[in-house]
Image: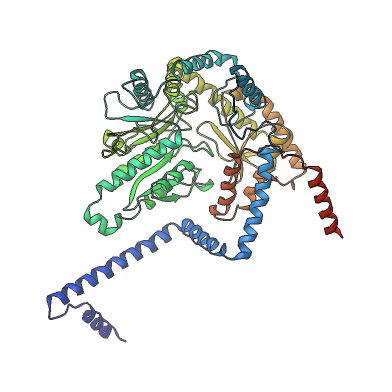
Amino acid sequence: MDLDKLRSSLESLLAPPEEGQARKLEHYLALAAAGYVSYRALAALLWAASNPTEFKNSAIESAIEAAKCLPAVKAMIQAEEDKSLAGIKRSLHGDGDPTALLEMPREGLNAKDVLETLKTMREHETRMRDGTATGGIYSDPFSADTKTMKELQADVWRLYSASNALYPGIYPSVRKIEAELIRMTLSMCSAPAEGPHCGLLTSGGTESVLLATKAYRDSFRSSITVLGRLMGACGPVEVVAGATRHPALDKAVKCFGMRLVTVPVNESTGFRMRPADVAAAIGPRTAFVYASAPTFPHGMVDPIAELGKLCQRRGVGLHVDNCLGGVLMSGMRDAGIAVPEFDFAVPGVTSMSVDLHKYGLASKGASTALFSSRELRAHAFVPVADFPGGFYVTPTMQGSRSGALMAQAWATMVYMGRDGYTRLARSVDSMVRRFAAGVEAIDGLRLLVRPDCSCVAFTSDVFCIYALVERMEHRRGWAFVTLQKPKAAQLCLMQAHERSLATMLTDLSAEAAYLREHPDTKATGMAGAYAVVENLPPSAAFGTLKGYQALALDVVPVAAPASSATAAAAAAAAGSHEA
């Protein structure tokens, strides 16, 4: 067919009918529908072209899910999961708990016995006391330097244990404490005292990220025009984030029916998001960009200043997850330590999540979600006006909230003061530098990247880094975080490491020397599980992860010894099988 005939055919196809208004309307509606379908198909193709890794993983995951329907494949996967979970169960529960409580005592115990029971349990938890842990609790509860602060926190708990922030009319001091905690944190994050900036006090970084995500989703939905809906903005609301984002964002996206668009973060990007990659990922349904200050795996701060300009230009929000670096990075700046821009001083930053229970040294259960405007924060609320029990609204995901945790956080921050956090920041920064230098001095190890803050990630090109993590834990008692993509180990420096850093580096050097001589040593257990799923999509590990969480929530008593009759029957059965 020549071009003239093709043109003639298209013209006749697109031309409206000559008679009948209904036929003409039907024709135009069909053309509009065809155009819309073509637009969505083109958008899908463009997304696949600009997100090849995500598209590949999605295709592989779909193939794996389909393969799981085959009985043989399903049985094979289940066998591998059972094998992994058996090892995890041994690690968590051993041969069982001889003092396991499966039901409440009929008669209550006296207070002295209850306390002695708990003290006995705590005696076995020695890692924080020895300074060999990483993460968990960022203060040093066993140091003489923090004794006064810990006693203060205990006294405050006793003072406020019977209080509930859900009832500000009954507990006005708790309302005051909550509001002042938010203002103090905003002040540390460069928010002007008289500006529109505001916040929420939450139970932790995950809740802070959840609330910020909900606020952006609902704000985006409220701004969609009719034309926007027709052009594709009515699909799932999107957030753009790097591969090193905290899993709290994944949880938020799943909870709120959103779509996560991931940009690469690896050695080639300097373990930071690249603004060009973020710009390419922003689309018509993007509500906000999520950046880290710093990332948990590598201690790197994303280029917040550049991202702020980009987000302003594209009309999307910018959330800075400052949970790990919260208070610490502000203290580093106060100490004159060079630190990348990260907070509300950067134009374009519209929200932050800042933990108070990490380097803020408050007891666990204290974080903040901060916003650049009251309008954005309002979208985090869920008011209910038709409840027969009356109007209902709470500031966070929770209803009742402990006033004691808030009072502890307030007391800790007032006790420490800006100068106290500045001293802490100098100490942590010094430890980060000393540990990084110590790693570089060990033959066979190298830094993955020189960190901006708090965390040091390192790897080996000579031996299996997971084997080193395992030997340091099982032979020396040191806890490190296991990283993947790429394989590495990580240490998050905390107050307690000040007492143990030199010994840790000595042990690390000794274990690295062993592995240099035995480079074929493999990792087993949980560290070995990373190697199994290294080249598979994330969903391949979901079964094991869910199984681990279920096991952690189980109470496993010591198995009762078999009766003599049962034992005899088992022995007879075993004999018949052997025959």
Q: Is residue 405 visible?
A: yes
The quadrant holding residue 331 is: top left
Q: Could you say where residue 185 lies in the image, as x and y percent from the top left?
A: 38, 25
The residue shown at (28%, 65%) is 36
Between 541 and 296, the one lying in front of the other is 541
The x and y percentages for residue 450 are 55, 36
Residue 137 shown left or right of residue 367 in the figure: right
Residue at the (58%, 23%) spot, across then down: 108
Q: Nearer the viewer, residue 35 or 234?
A: 234
Q: Is residue 331 left or right of residue 505?
A: left
Given the current orientation, which residue lies at the most extreme top position? 148
Residue at screen point 19% across, 73% down: 26
Quadrant where the N terminus sits is bottom left
Give the percent coordinates (x, y) of residue 497: 61, 25
Rendering coords of residue 571 (x, y %)? 83, 50
Q: Number of numbered discs present?
A: 0
Relative to residue 116, is residue 572 drawn left or right?
Answer: right
Would you place residue 467 above or below residue 36 in this image?
A: above
Nearer to us in this view, 180 or 430: 180
Q: Residue 492 is drawn in which quadrant?
A: top right
Q: Is residue 138 above or below residue 29?
A: above
